[in-house]
Image (tube, coloured by chain):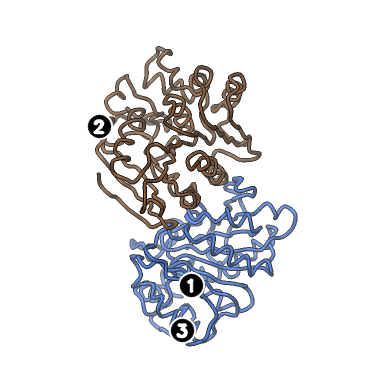
Chain colours: A brown, B blue
Amino acid sequence: MKTLSENRCFGGVQGVYSHASAATGTDMTFGLFLPEAAEDQPVPVLWYLSGLTCTHENAMVKAGAQRWAAEAGIALVFPDTSPRGDDVANDAAFDLGQGAGFYVNATEAPWAPHFQMWDYVAEDLPRLLFSAFPLDDTAQAITGHSMGGHGALTLAMSFPGRFRSVSAFAPICNPTASDWGRKQFTAYLGTDEATWTPHDATLLMRRFGFDGPMLVDQGTADQFLDLLKPETLATAMAERRQGGTIRMQKGYDHSYFFVASFIEDHIAFHANALLR
Amino acid sequence: MKTLSENRCFGGVQGVYSHASAATGTDMTFGLFLPEAAEDQPVPVLWYLSGLTCTHENAMVKAGAQRWAAEAGIALVFPDTSPRGDDVANDAAFDLGQGAGFYVNATEAPWAPHFQMWDYVAEDLPRLLFSAFPLDDTAQAITGHSMGGHGALTLAMSFPGRFRSVSAFAPICNPTASDWGRKQFTAYLGTDEATWTPHDATLLMRRFGFDGPMLVDQGTADQFLDLLKPETLATAMAERRQGGTIRMQKGYDHSYFFVASFIEDHIAFHANALLR
């Protein structure tokens, strides 16, 4: 593991590190905020999965999350959204290939060799983090934005007991029925739609639900609302009698100004589960 | 004036606008955050002047200021740091030309035609802002980072009564004695150093001081500390018996992680002066 940068931030340290990932077969970069409390003992962790076009950096510099994580004594992890590099497959579209890993393990050419983002965020990066940093692996929570909200919801429901709480900002809720999903799942997973269902939050909600608190924020002026389909997740949550909150935030769009406006609420929500 | 974008943000609106500036003879872009309170009545204004290489955008997306401005009911203005465009003079160095206007009116070739940033932030942009937006021109305060801290301090001391309070993050405190200053003043203002003195915060402190509260934050791990010279401003403040606070923040560097860590304090500081 290499340290790319470390900046003091709200009494803690905002670091950026790279490491050779066994899952993706590439070097991967991630951001990690450690609050001051981590100097004394392992601290709880909130994962933040980012959206299309993002790297590890966007949320780290734009969301304003460190202020609240520092106060709560919680670490923040900001993984990248795909493998990267000249020898990694890519596509000219912003929503496929590098920057658009969709948190799945690709089985199809040309993506399969490196696009193993499910394993990366579920196994590879956790293994590194919990061995190299003072983090408490029994106190994890997860959130994300857009494609990262999809990742957060699907991971949370796929690993019962791992995450105490889950939240999302404008998540892609039903990718098997959206152009943000069908295109990418076809490319990464192939045309057999049975392989897609483990990666659709609405379908997972119908089958499994989530054993813990859930919070979803969605802007009513989101320019991608038709692709995100929060109504499908809302319906599945109601039908399952899933505990949780979906908030439609009047006038907010898909930008980081939306995320920043509500990150305080999300961190307080997760802190309530992590620090109990 | 053209609206380039408007995003709902902490209950208010983060806008980006461009306008034809009489001062610079170019189109200029600025950011303006209006809190929800501006829907009902004119609100106080905090100016935020940015540093070398920045546009209107850096502080707007990285500083996390809107959270606190929204709560206090204060607007934030984020001007650009220079004129820009293909027909505007430039330099290959990051610290001269476009992105490095230093908040002075250039008198020398090739800069004089457009690099009139003092007039832009002191006259041109205020004229537009107070006619086009619900802002209270009797309740202004000013802050800035690095080169923008230099701009904030020199403007505040040059227009007694205009700004109720002034603060700065890692300001260039003594540019007439620093490589961040001598190079640029020579280029923009010429070799007669008498023309430089109105643009040096330490020299202005010795002659005039500031009739209001002052707050300066400086990281002890700032990689540019030798160029910033906070000790000269501290000395001038002590000699003048200027009221104010200079805080040396242990371990912090020059980045926006430093600014974000203390912006809450600065906005509370200005709110105390603006809302009295």
Q: Amino acid at mark 2?
A: Ala
Residue found farthest to the front: A276
Q: Which mark is nearer the camera, 2 or 3?
A: 2
Report, in whole angstroms, how far the alpha carbon at label 2 lies from the one at label 3. Answer: 58 Å
Q: Chain of mark 2?
A: A
SS at mark 3? helix
Identity of the residue drawn at 34% across and 23% down? A106
Identity of the residue drawn at 50% across and 50% down? A68
Query: Could you say which disc has been placed on residue A22 in the image?
Result: 2
Q: Chain of mark 3?
A: B
Position of residue A75 relative to residue A24, above or below, is: below
Q: Which mark is nearer the camera, 1 or 2?
A: 2
Category of crowding for the residue at label 3, using alpha-carbon neighbours closer than 10 angstroms: few (below 14), some (14–19), many (at least 20): many
Of A156 and A188, nearer the camera is A156
Give the number of marks.
3
Which image quarter is the N terminus of chain B in? bottom right
Report, in whole angstroms, how far the alpha carbon at label 1 lies from the one at label 3. Answer: 22 Å
Q: Which residue is disc 1 drawn over?
A: B104
Identity of the residue drawn at 64% across and 77% down? B161
Q: Position of residue B143 (x, y in %)?
A: 53, 67
Q: Chain of mark 1?
A: B
Q: Amino acid at mark 3?
A: Ala
SS at mark 1? loop
Q: Amino acid at mark 1?
A: Val
Query: Could you say which disc has been placed on residue B236 in the image?
Result: 3
Q: Quadrant of residue A97?
A: top left
Q: Same chain for marks 2 and 3?
A: no
Q: Same chain for marks 1 and 2?
A: no
Residue B1 as seen in the image, left or right of residue B60: right
